[in-house]
């Protein structure tokens, strides 16, 4: 039985690179106009210096009638790939923004762009340009299936990560205690309403925290640093969880801090809808040692692959998968299973939950560091 459990956990943790989400194809251009490819990053001060010039050139149809400006935010997956393509074609070793590509010429940095771009466009005609980035040999910059899989997140990755992350003893224990308190007074309707309020609060808190962190990371322009930091933390947390499968409670253990359990117990005993909402918020914050490794890794991936707006569906689905086990626990208790029985199951299977989370964290971290995702 244990061998079967291990096999299932391994299979779930390794379903990471299937069904890639389609990426947009490369930009194409013709010989009828002059294409300016402007690569930038949100929150970049040097990019902010260049942007007015790009906008002025793009809007001046009288002076630059043949010019079309293409904007590429490098935190977007497709634009990032095009940015990497440009760096490769021009042998750019210091990959930074702002970067402007026009024909077979590139300018990097605000000083170089502002000082040279308009001179380059004087009396320019489309036929004078060898547009190596997007006009000639378009196959060179088309995203192949293999590269899509490396650059694009997958729904199996998001859903599997959320589900396994959600199978954690910390949140289970609080929900079971909350349900048991309400079952003692025999109010099943209030139990389902209060339990639902708790789960919704967990969902909303996790989503807001994830979106807020992702936005801060991208605005600060530290996506690459956070990407590798998140991968490293995921591996460390994963190894600690795997350790708990063999020696639970010995050494470092990822769990809700002992000094916070009193606060959680106080709100759980109240067993009201408002207290359940507060409880969901507190548990979401306090249980980060249990679940933070996976979520942080996913946020690191999202911040490096796409914009904040594009990341919203992924965060919504991830957190929906995260609360799915809580919904199952609540439904089982509502159907008549004794909360004590559910809690006994939680304690018995706790080490398997740790193993599942540990394998996922280590696998995810290694895939990130190795460049597969």
Image (tube, rainbow, N blue to C red):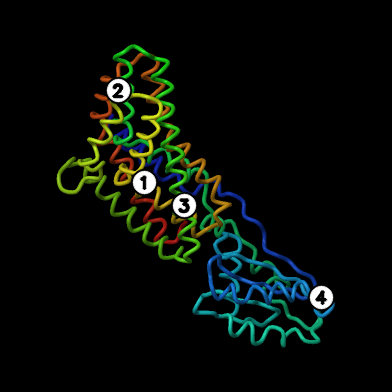
In the rendered view, would you say 203 is above or below 187? below
Q: Earlier in the sequence, mark 1 or mark 2?
A: 2
Q: Earlier in the sequence, mark 2 or mark 4?
A: 4
In the rendered view, would you say 363 is above or below 3? below
Q: Earlier in the sequence, mark 4 or mark 3?
A: 4
Q: Which residue is mark 1?
A: 360
Q: Earlier in the sequence, mark 3 or mark 1?
A: 3
Residue appearing at x 43%, y 22% in the figure: 193
Q: Is residue 260 left or right of residue 53?
A: left
Q: Nearer the viewer, residue 83 or 272?
A: 272
Nearer the observer: mark 1 or 2; the answer is: 2
Nearer the observer: mark 2 or 3; the answer is: 3
Nearer the observer: mark 1 or 4; the answer is: 4
| Secondary element type, mark 1 | helix
Determine the CA span between mark 2 and mark 3.
Answer: 34 Å
| Secondary element type, mark 4 | loop
Graded by Cα atoms within 10 Å as few (under 14), some (14 to 19) or many (20 or more), the crowding at tag 4 reads: some
Residue appearing at x 30%, y 28% in the figure: 268
Q: Which residue is mark 2?
A: 342
Q: Which residue is mark 4?
A: 66
Q: Which residue is mark 3?
A: 212
Quarter of the figure that contains the N terminus: top left
Nearer the observer: mark 3 or 1; the answer is: 3
Q: Nearer the viewer, residue 125 or 243?
A: 125
Graded by Cα atoms within 10 Å as few (under 14), some (14 to 19) or many (20 or more), the crowding at tag 2 reads: some
Determine the CA span between mark 3 and mark 1.
Answer: 24 Å
Q: Nearer the viewer, residue 314 or 4?
A: 314
In the rendered view, would you say 279 is above or below 115? above
Q: Are marks 4 and 3 in contact (CB under 8 Å)?
A: no
Q: Position of residue 269 (x, y in %)?
A: 28, 25
């Amino acid at each position: 039985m244990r061998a079967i459990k291990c096999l299932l956990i391994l299979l779930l943790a390794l379903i990471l690179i299937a069904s890639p989400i389609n990426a947009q194809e490369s930009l194409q251009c013709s010989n009828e106009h002059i294409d300016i490819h402007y690569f930038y990053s949100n929150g970049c001060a040097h990019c902010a210096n260049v942007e007015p010039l790009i906008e002025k050139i793009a809007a001046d149809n009288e002076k630059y009638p043949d010019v079309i400006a293409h904007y590429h935010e490098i935190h977007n997956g497709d634009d990032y790939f095009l940015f990497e393509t440009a760096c490769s074609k021009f042998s750019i070793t210091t990959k930074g923004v702002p970067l402007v590509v026009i024909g077979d010429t590139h300018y990097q940095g605000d000083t170089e762009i502002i000082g040279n771009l308009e001179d380059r466009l004087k009396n320019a005609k489309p036929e004078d340009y060898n547009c190596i980035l997007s006009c000639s040999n378009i196959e060179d910059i088309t995203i192949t299936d293999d590269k899509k899989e490396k650059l694009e997140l997958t729904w199996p990755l998001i859903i599997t990560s959320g589900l396994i992350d959600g199978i954690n003893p910390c949140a289970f224990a609080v929900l079971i205690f909350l349900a048991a308190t309400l079952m003692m007074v025999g109010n099943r309707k209030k139990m389902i309403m209060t339990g639902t309020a708790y789960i919704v609060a967990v969902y909303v808190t996790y989503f807001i925290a994830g979106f807020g962190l992702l936005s801060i990371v991208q605005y600060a322009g530290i996506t690459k640093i956070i990407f590798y930091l998140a991968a490293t933390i995921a591996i460390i947390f994963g190894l600690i969880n795997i350790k708990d499968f063999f020696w639970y409670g010995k050494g470092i253990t990822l769990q809700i801090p002992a000094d916070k359990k009193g606060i959680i117990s106080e709100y759980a005993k109240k067993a009201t809808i408002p207290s359940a909402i507060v409880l969901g918020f507190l548990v979401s914050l306090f249980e980060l040692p249990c679940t933070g490794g996976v979520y942080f890794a996913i946020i690191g991936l999202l911040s490096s692959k796409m914009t904040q707006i594009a990341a919203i569906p992924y965060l919504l689905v991830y957190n929906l998968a995260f609360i799915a086990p809580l919904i199952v626990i609540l439904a089982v208790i509502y159907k008549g299973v004794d909360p004590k029985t559910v809690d006994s199951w939680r304690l018995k299977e706790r080490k398997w939950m740790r193993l599942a989370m540990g394998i996922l964290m280590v696998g995810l971290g290694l895939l990130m560091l190795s460049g597969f995702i």
